[in-house]
Structures are given as structure tokens and as C-alpha cells.
Amino acid sequence: MKGSIKSKLTFIILAVTTITSAIGYIGFISWYMNEQYKKTIELSNTIGIVISQDVGKLILLDDVSAAADISTQLKSFTNLQKLVLYKKDGKPILQYNIDNKSFDVPKIDFNNIDEISKNENLITIYHKANYQDTYLGVVFFEFKVESLSDIIKKDIFVIILIFMYVLGISFILAKTFATKFTEPVLKLVSFLERIDKTESLSKRVTTSEKNEFGKLYKEVNTMLERIENSYYILKVASAAFETQSGMIITDANQKILQVNKSFSKITGYTLDEVIGKKPALFKSGLHNKEFYDKMFDSLRKNNFWMGEITNIKKDGSLINEHLIIQSVLNEKNEVIYYVASFLDTTKQKEIENQLEINQQILLQQAKLAAMGEMLENIAHQWKQPLSIITTLTSGILLNKELNILTDEFLKDGLNNITNSVKYMSKTIDDFRNFYNNKLEKKEFSIKNSIEKSLVLLSSKLMKNNVIIIKNIEDIEILGYENELIQVYMNILNNAMDSLENLKDEIKIIKITGRIEGNKAYIEFLDNAGGINEEIIDKIFDSHFTTKDATKGTGIGLYMSRIIISKAKGELDVFNKTFDFKEKSYKGANFIITLPLK
């Protein structure tokens, strides 16, 4: 059906009104004609009663004047067209016609007496004629009633007038109620059209209706709220999908359904090239079956897997990925999708590897920077045993030339030479062990490692008359001893450099080691006056130094913090005041914190 709801509704209301009016009128006509039928039957009974006495006279007494009386009485019944009076033997003895015209008297069938028949607008009735409970004969009546066409013709103008009036009123009412009915609908349609074209989903439609329209508006607002939430979630999901991370969505059978732009940018594959295929397409061959078994076992148990993986790009080059796979479940906890996101960590790996190399280079540079001091320390430590060896060998040779060399003198001299050589050998071993590039993680004593660093720096400590105060608990940790010794030496060298500025004052370095909870704390505290508060936060920066270029590079403390961080520990510094022999001193307090396990 074409046309607006308003016109359709108006047409429906007019049609219903017309049909209802027609049905009502037809019902009225039916009722009216039925009433005529019943009244005609009642009239026949009434006539029978009225003329019963004269009928008795006519039949029983053969009183001809009674016939005239009957005809006179019948004139008052205008609906009565004909009347015939039959005796019991079927012989008609009286006939009446409203037009006073003769007519053919119908023969009577006594078997059908009391039946009523209707032919168009004529009703024929047969009644038994009784007088004082005496059966005298039969009376035939023929009544004229109004037919349907008679009634319509008679009232046609009134009917048309009433119909036009009703139709007009109905049209006005239909128009009014159709407008009232369609107005909320049209308002809602107009609102939704604006929402679709221009306005935000945050808009809501309002109405004062308290009926079904009110419920409809409420449902539309609820729907808009859900759409707005869904649209927001969709925008967030869309934004998340188009991130810098490559993303893949597969079905439960691991067939690729969708990828994002970052995936194509990273791998070189387009959606058309991978859709319907499995992620096995990107396997590099560098991971064994056990690796993938663990991955899928985690997905089955936890619906999640995260790890590092090496895949292959379209051009055949390798790509390092930090990969996260998440299972998406339905209400039955069945997997319907897999969502994978990955970051290209190839460059990061290269940077990390290069950083590791650079750190090793810096560590070696730091060691080389201390090598001069170490050689000086070794030379100082070797000076005395070399002097002893020279003196002893000279004495042995002199006594030999003078023939006064005794076995006891030779034995004591050789023993002293051997002990001096052993001391020198140990010094070389300590030096070689410290500069050994082979890193070996093992358990070692912090106390012993500190002693080793002090031995390596003993020459400088003695030269500067530094007093070492030690309070170190026996602590065993797992780590790289040589790297930790390097940290000790960097801190001690910085302390000794600062202590050189003290002229006639006592020079102190306090070393303590203790355990608190599950951590080891190692502290180095000097009395050189502390670090300027303006630079104390910068001393661990790369190449930061307050020394002359000939005395330091600034990488010692920087490398020290890196070494401690790699051991999952911390290296901090702050200024601290302490008392020694009833005198107060201030200095830099370096604290190393290391985990015991």
C-alpha cells in the first residue's frame, strides 16, 4: 500500500465508519422487517379475535348481515389485503379485498394450516376460526408489509443525509486522531533521520506520552544508549586494532580472518595474501616442536600465551617478535577466535646486543683506566721482594768468592728468594684473575672479594696513608665476583682521589657489610667532606666527572651502577656524618644492595 501512515489511517477509520454504518443500517432494516413480521402475526391474531363473534354468526346462524359487519371491521386494518373464510369442509363463505375487487379464492390445504409463508412484500397466514372453543373453520389472511427496497426508497434522502453527516464527522475525527497518532511516530522518524545524518548518538528523544508511544520512545533511547556504547567500544577496538603492534585474528581452526595495517607493514604480507591461511606460514624454523607444544598448552589451559618468537617476513628475512596470543571464548567457554598482537623487536634486540657489547667495552675501558694504577701498585709490591732477591743473590755470590759460603747461609738465602718469588707470583695471579675476560657466575664471599680489591689497591692505600676500617659479616652470594671487585675498586679509587685533598688530616675509609632480610648491604664511607649536593644526582651519568681529564674518564661509577643493576641490585650515594676517635667527620657514603638469592 502506498501513501503515508496518516492517509492510510484516515482511510481505515473512514472505511471502518462506513462499513460500521452500513452494517448498523442493515441490522436496523433486518430488525425492522422482523418486527413487521411479528406484528403482522400478532395482527392476524387480533383480527381473528375481533371478527370471531361475527364469524360464529355467519357460520352457525347463517346470518348474512354478519358478513357485512366483518367487511366493515376489516376496513380499519390497512395492512390487510385479502381475507377468506372457509368452513370446515373447505368451502369459502366469505372473501374480503381491500380494493373491493373479486379475486380467485385459493384452495385450502388443511394439512398446512397454521403455516406462514412470505412472498416479496406479502405474508399469508392461515388461522383456525374458533368461537367459544368451537372449531368453525379456517381464516386466510394476506397482509402487505414494506420490502427492503420500499424502506430504502422511502428513507433514501434521510439515509444519504445521515451518511454524509456521519462521514463528515468521521473524516474530521479520523483526521484529528490520525494526526495525533502519527505525530509521535513522525517526530521519532525525524529524530532518527537527524541522528543518522548529522547529530551525535548521545542525543535522546523525549515525549510527554504516557502510553505505548512513551514505552517506544524509552526503548529507542535504550537502543541508542546501547548503540552509543557499542560504537564507543567499536571505536576503541578499531583504534586498538590499528596500533603500531601487528595484529592477527584467526578462527578456532587458526585460519586467518583479519590483519591490521601494522601487520602488513612489518611482515610485508597483505590481507589477501594471508586470509584463510594459518600463522604457520610465518615459521622461521628456529623453534622446535617443544616450543610450539608449550605455546598451545598454555592457550588450552590459560587462554593466553606471551613470549619471544622469531618468524620470517615475506622477503625471507627474520623478524624478532614479542608476541601475545589471547583466546576469545563464547558463553559455553568454547574458543571462537584467537587474537594475536606482536611488536617488532628486531631493532631492539640489535640495540640490546650492541649495548651489551658497548657495556663490555666500557667495562674493559674502566679496567684499562685502572691498569696504570695497578701496574704502579705491582711495581711497588715487587720492589721490596726484588730488593731482597738482589741482596741475597749478591751475598751468596760474594760469600762464594770469599770461600765463606756455608750451607746454612745458602739454604736461608734460597728460602727467602723462593718466598719472595711466591709473593710476586701471587701478585701476578691476583692481577691476572682480575683482568680475566671469562665471566663465571659462582658463589663467593663478599668479605674475601673486598679483601682482594684492597690487595690490588694496597700500594695506593699505603702511599696515601689511608686507614681502612672494616666491619664485614661473612656473606655468601651468587654472582660475578670480578665485576663486583671492579665496582669496589671504582668506589675506593674515587674515595682515595677525594682524600688526596686532605693535607695533614687523617684519611679514613670505612667498609661495612651486613644482611637485612633477604638482601646484602655493602657500604663504603670516607671522610673527604662529601659530594656537592648540586652534582650528587649526576655522578652516575655516563662520562660525568669532576676530575682533570688526565685523571679520570667519568665511566667508572656509570659502569658500576650498570653492573649492580644487571645483578638486580642497587647502587646509591648520599652524604653522611660519622664520629671517629671523638671527632666528627663528613663524607660520601656509597651503598650497594644485592639480593641474596
Image: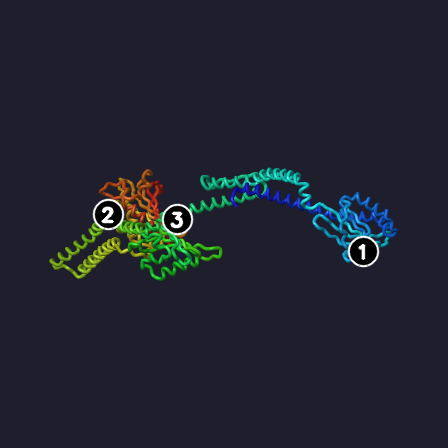
Amino acid type indicated by mark 2:
Ala
The x, y position of residue 85, in whole percent, is: 81, 51
The x, y position of residue 116, in whole percent, is: 75, 52
In the foreground, 204 or 252: 204
Q: Quadrant of the C terminus?
A: bottom left
- Mark 2 element type: helix
Q: Is label 1 in contact with label 3 (beta carbons under 8 Å)?
A: no
The numbered disc on residue 369 is 2
Can I make out residue 432 in this image? Answer: yes
Could you tell me how far apart the alpha carbons at marks 2 and 1 are, in whole angstroms? 161 Å
Amino acid type indicated by mark 3:
Phe
Q: Residues within 10 Å of mark 3 (few under 14, many from 20)?
A: some
- Residue tagged 3: 241
- Residue tagged 1: 90
Instruction: Locate residue 146 relative to residue 309 in the image: left or right.
Output: right
- Mark 3 element type: helix
In the foreground, 386 or 23: 23
For image coordinates 35% across by 40% down, the residue present is 584
Q: Nearer the viewer, mark 1 or mark 3?
A: 1
For image coordinates 44% across by 54% down, the residue present is 328
Amino acid type indicated by mark 1:
Gly
User: Of label 2 and label 1, which has the lower sequence position?
Assistant: 1
Residue furthest to the right: 61
